[in-house]
Image: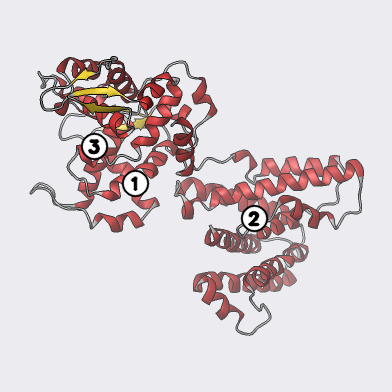
Amino acid sequence: MYQESLQNLQAIGINIREEFFTLKELDVPLLRGVKLLLQSIDATGLKLTQKGYLPTKVVKSIVEVAITQAEKRYLHLQKRFYENEHLSANMARVVVETLKLTKVQKGKLLLTKKGNEFLSLNPQEQYIILLNIMFGINLGYFDGHQEALCVHNSSVVMLQLLRDKDKDFRTVEVYTVLLLDSYPTIEEELNKLEFLNYAEKDKFDIFVSIAETRLFERLFLSLGLADMKSEKYPKENQFTKNKFFDILIDEKNAVNKDLLFSKKLLKIFQDEIRKNNLDIDLFEVIMYLFVQYSHVPSPPKNKVINLLMQKHSVIGTLKISYESLYEKLIQSVLTSYEEFTQLDTVGANRETLVDEYKHMIDTLFTLVETPKPFNTVQKLHILPSFILDILKLHYDLDTFSHDFILECSKIFGEEFAMDVGQLMMLLNQLEKDAKKLKRNKPNFQQGVKEFLQTYIMITLELRSREL
């Protein structure tokens, strides 16, 4: 059960951190409720009520240990402890039956072999099993909108969105807007939502309402992943991830920012080149690597390094120094791709990415800029050929044809073809400007940055298209 659950979570992009397995205690309402229910069943079984519900004594015990912040709001209104009137008890019963940890026989709830196996596991293993099954159960069973699959299918995405955001209390409406902004295709599914009563007038509001009860109150709170700030009407309740969430699941969009091209990282590479007396044009190699890794599947690192090493007739320690630096540069390129293609693959914070992207362009500009504009342009000359070579090699485009841009647009779309054409035009204009200038001027510098940005945009578009 445990290994299968762990593999299922990994398959849907939920990666459990090693730190989670070292925790001594788990503060998880659902886990406490499930364990108490299973431990309430002795060798002879747990006698159910005439209608097949859990006895009120067991329901009361489950509620006392498994109640969530959402349920506490209404506890003072409920004087009875019937299974169908308390969500924590009802969910514990649904989970154990879905996992086949129990079975009903002659009016009694009995432990199965799987149930005994579950109780023998450690808390971390038990939790992984519950986490996995909760993304399989249609929680619409608890809110009446069973057919609202757009909410059910958004559960993992919303989980990751909550994980990637800074710890701050937000309304579910805010989270939902961020979700639809990152995944606009979900919005098309909203039209399939049905109005259940006269008070439901806007389908977006229905989505928000279902997401609050189904995902935040009944999924994230029950699994111990979120904290809730209960507000009095008409204010909306607010939610945020908690410390346990950070310990449990790795960020989907997290990359090692220290590996992104920055002026600080650039200095480290330049120091390494000087220290080991390496003959490497850092700018040319970086731009070459961006093109080499613009297609998927990515070429093996050793193959790319071998191609780069053909320029150097070296052996021994010097050869190792070259290969080591090339491997670090490749890792930085791959990290940059992982970061800057997020908007097209998993969604991300646009403002942060734009700032990082601008900083990378500025960093590349410091590599290519020389005191004389003519020399700067000479360093840019090789870049269009990198792009054309990759288009010819991987997409079988005749780059010497008069119809090259037209054929390019047929494969990649008009916008991409225009970017390729723009790259050529910008280089041509920079060549003209360089002949008139003896030293760099702001307009020329801006033109170089625009050229670099267009180049990187082309490689990002190729990479995103493949992904």
- N-term-proximal mark, 3 vs 2: 3
What residue is drawn where x is 71% and y is 54%? 286
Is 261 on the left-hand or right-hand side of 126? right
User: Is residue 313 something one can see in this rendering?
Assistant: yes
Residue lying at the far left of the rendered structure: 198
Density class for disc 2 (Cα within 10 Å; few <14, some 14-19, many ≥20) is few
Position in image of residue 289 (x %, y %) = 70, 56
Is 263 on the left-hand or right-hand side of 191? right
Element class at badge 2: loop
- Real-space CA distance between mark 2 and mark 1, rounded to the nearest whole angstrom: 30 Å
Q: Nearer the viewer, residue 381 or 459?
A: 459
Q: Is residue 139 above or below residue 40?
A: below
Residue designated by label 3: 213
Question: What's the amino acid at mark 3?
Answer: Thr
- N-term-proximal mark, 3 vs 1: 1
Residue designated by label 2: 298
What residue is drawn where x is 44% and y is 49%? 347
Q: Which mark is residue 270?
A: none
Residue lying at the far bottom of the rendered structure: 402
- Real-space CA distance between mark 3 and mark 2, rounded to the nearest whole angstrom: 42 Å
- Real-space CA distance between mark 3 and mark 1, rounded to the nearest whole angstrom: 14 Å
What residue is drawn where x is 61% and y is 46%? 335
Q: Which mark is residue 154?
A: 1
Q: Quadrant of the N terminus?
A: top left
Is 403 on the left-hand or right-hand side of 213? right
Q: Is residue 386 above or below residue 98?
A: below
Density class for disc 1 (Cα within 10 Å; few <14, some 14-19, many ≥20) is some
Position in image of residue 371 (x %, y %) = 76, 57
Q: Quadrant of residue 394?
A: bottom right
What residue is drawn where x is 45% and y is 20%? 122
Q: Nearer the viewer, residue 448 or 262?
A: 262
